Structure formats: C-alpha cells, structure tokens
Amino acid sequence: MRSMRAKTWAAALALLQSLPALAQPAAPVRIEVQANASGPKINRDIFGQFAEHLGTGIYGGVWVGPDSPIPNVRGIRSDVVQALRAIKVPNVRWPGGCFADEYHWREGIGPAAKRPARLNASWGGVIEPNSFGTHEFMDFVDQLGADVFLSVNVGSGTVQEGADWLEYLTANKPTSLEKERVANGHPAPYKIKYLGLGNENWACGGAMSADHYVEEMKRYAHYMRNLNPAQTGEGAMKRVAVGWDSGNDDYTEAVMKAWKNKNWAWDIEGVSLHGYTIPNTWEKKGPSVGFGEDEYAKGIKATLKMKEWIAKQTAIMDRYDPEKKLGLYVDEWGIWVDPNPGSNPSFLQQQNTIPDAVIAALNLDLFMRNADRIHGTNIAQMVNVLQAMILTDGPKMLLTPTYHVYRMYVPFHDAIGVPVSFDAGTYAHGDINLPRVDAIAARDKSGKLWLALVNVDPNRATKVSAALAGVKATYAKGEILTAAAVDAHNSFESANDVAPKPFSGRASGGQLQFDLPPKAIAVVEVR
Ligand code: AHR
C-alpha cells in the first residue's frame, strides 16, 4: 500500500516536471534599448515577396482572368491585392524560382488567345497557359504599389533573349521592341528595380559549376541594359548574382572573387542567398498542421540555421567587399514542410500556423539586425505556396499567421535600427535548447520608436522589462499575435482564429513591463 502511494507521488512529480508551463514560470527578461543611438537603415525590401509560376501561386491565387466571377481588375483578383496592399509589399520577385530558368518572355505578351500553352516542367508538368505574362505582372505590382524584381532566364535562355526583354520593358526610343510594347498597351517604359541573374544555377538553373556560372553571369551583367532614363544614379537597376544556398557555398566565393577583379564591362550590386527551414529531412520534412511540441521545437531550431548561413555569407562578402558596396539578398527563404494531404505534391501547398509566424518574426529580426549587408529578402512564397501570406480556394481567401506578422512589422520598413541588448534565456524541449526571447527596435521615418518582442517558448508566459536609454517611457501600445494550440492556424471555415489583438505594456519608473504569453509576437510603439 505504501509503495503504491510512493509510486503515485513519483508519477505525479514526473508529470509536473514535464509540464514546465505549470511547474516553473519563465525567468523575466531585461532588455536595454539604446534609444539615443542609431544602427543601419532597415531597407523596406527586407519585407519583399516572391511569386512563382508554381501550383496556384499565380493561377488562381493572383490571376483569375477578366471573365472570372471572382472580383478582379483586369484579371487580377481584388481581394488578394487589397490584402497585400495592407502589408505594403515593397517588391515582388517573379517569375521564379526554377521556373524563371525555363521562362521565355515572348510567350507571355500579345493577344491572350495567341499565347502558346507550354508545360511547366519545373512544377508538375501542368499546362502553363501564359495568360499571366509581362504586362499582367507589371499591372499586378502596379496595383500593389510595389517594385519589380525580375529573374532573367540564364539556364535555358540566351543573353540576347534577356537583353531583348530588358529593351522591350525599358526602352524610351522608337526601337522595334519599344514599338511592340507601345502596341501592347504600355507607352511609358517600365521600371525594374532588381534583376536576378538566374536562379539556383547549380541545380534547376542549368547544373552549372560555380566557374561556369560566373562566366555566364558576367555576360548577362554586361548586356542586360536598363534603358529607362528615369533609372540612373540612386535609382539605377540593381543586378543580383546567384550566391549561396544551404549546402553550396562555392558560388558566393566565385562570384565575389570575380567581382573583386572585374573590369569596366560588367558589375553587379548584390549576391543572393537561398535558405529554407526544413524541420526534419528533405525527404520527410514534417507536417504543416496536426503536430505537437516536438515539431514546433524542431522547426524553430531549423530556422535558427539562417543565422549561421548569413554569418558565412557575409564573411565571404566582407573579404572581397569590406566597404559593403554589394547587398546580400536572401531572395528565397521560409519554412518548407510536407504538402497538404491530397494536394498535388508539386504545388507545394502547406498550412500556415502560429509557429510559422514565430519563424517569420525571428528571421525578419535577424535580417533587420544585419541590415548593413542585407538589402532585401523575399519570403517563399506570397500566395498558396510554401510559407504563404495568403491562401485561396476558388473565391475564398484567408490571411495566414505569417501575413499578420508582415502587417505588424510595417513600421520597420525603411526605419533606422536602434541597438538592443538582452539575455534571451533558454527554451528547452528534450535535448533542444533555444533562445527563449527575441527583441528588435527601430525608429520609423516620422521618428516614432517601435519595439518588437517574440516569446519563443510555446508553454510559458514571460515577463519582459525594457529600459530605454535617453527616454523616460510612459507608453507602449500595439498588437500581439498568439494562439493556444501549438499548431493553431486559420482555415476557410474559421479564418480569424489566429489574428492580432491589441496589446500594451505598463510604464513604471520610466521603464516598460510586458507580459508576453507563450508563442507570441508583439509590436508596440513606445513613447
Ligand atoms: O520556392 C520553391 C523553389 O525552391 C524555387 O523555385 C527554387 O528556386 C527553390 O529551390
């Protein structure tokens, strides 16, 4: 009888210890905000998007055609545009991804009925109708108020094809290509802010060695001429060469070495990095919904690899470019998990959960912290693909937890970083130990001070106190995104389960106190 009671107590104790939320409150975290100091400018292009001809990323998600019963403007769905305008999308990278290196721009201009139907060999061999081409994309970004990030076909295209595309888009003198653009309805030359010189050319972009890519890239960098007279000086088009990917670091080294020794005939303004968050293995990445804390912790652990990747990439760039003339563009990133059961596996459709929002916030914080080198990033992908902002199903549309982070982070666009220091504490699960809290601060263009806080711990709330050098704080108000279930998400049946709520801190003695619930992202204006 006695030993039975002892066993029951031991079992109860073990259970309590396995429930840290109930057993041990998290230690408070103290943040020092150097409100009277300035860091680098946070380029708004850090909040860029990526839209590839992949699954329903374009067809269905953005383009429904002018005859669709789904409300649209010239074929582009209005609900999606309205939602994206609210997150102030700075630029959209298009048409790929792998698709960019099989895309031939001429097939996507002129009368819709005459455009050829091709196979999208990169993504499931489905029909690519070419109804969404150059002019439709330019109309889309114009409706968003965003800039253009075009990826030119280096893998299966030619230098001449790429040069013609640039002339078609940007010429303001009456060349045949300029006249063709005018005849197709756009007299004014377009602006192209970024030109990606290929995409992952070590693999889907032509399986090129780094040295081979560099020789190709130099030709593209020379001949891709932007002829728009409005794009000179500060506003000149920026060329982004293909750089590092998780598992492949020779491209950046080769590109930077060539750049260091370049002659007058070519130049670039940036190098790319692609890095996806894979919670498990490439073969079995893990579910996007219906998981517990194990998958949560693995996902956060996997996403923190981005810090090492950026450190490695910037170390290479710093060796050849200590003055930081070139930008690092993380032009594909995000969590990549198994496709939704029953969906076409080539369409890369996945649900989006509260951990995805934590992952988005941690990465955006990291990019902002490295804003002296990182001039832009593009999350993969904007609608219906991978870590999407928006999911659609016919006429239905929902905003994902990741979308809400992008909306809450708008004050950081083009803001000036403010240094913060803190001891993050530890979130432990099994043998995984991770920083428990993250924080970033910046002053927006009107001088307002903003603070973003993340509580990574999915079980334990945490108290955060913030001391602001040079400011006797009296006010901290904004929004918080959190949810009870570890895989909480929005569905077409219940689209607002995960949505931001008002949130505020308490001021006391010139400092601010915050109570952050588990797995939460908060953004507040501080006065
Ligand atoms: O975003 C999906 C794919 O991931 C892109 O097409 C490719 O560049 C990367 O491998």
Image: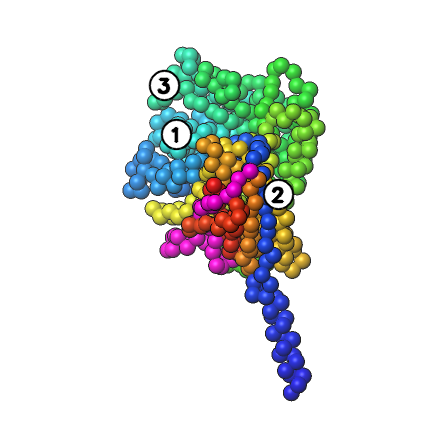
Question: Marks 1 and 2: in contact by CB < 8 Å?
Answer: no
The spot of residue 222 in percent (x, y) is 58, 18
Looking at the rendered structure, the secondary structure element under dot 3 is loop
Q: Which residue is mark 2?
A: 421
Q: Is residue 206 left or right of residue 175?
A: right
Given the image, on which type of amino acid does mark 2 rest?
Answer: Ser
Q: Badge 2 local density, few (<14 within 10 Å), some, or many (20+)?
A: few
**In this image, 351 relative to 258: left or right?**
left
Q: Quadrant of the N terminus?
A: bottom right
Q: Which badge, 3 or 2, is on the more N-terminal residue?
A: 3
Q: Which residues are magenta?
A: 470-499
Q: Which residue has dot 3 on it?
A: 187
Dot 1 lies on which element? helix
Disc number placed over residue 142 in the picture, else none: 1
Q: Amino acid at mark 3?
A: Pro
Residue 45 in the image, given as x and y percentages of width and height: 50, 32
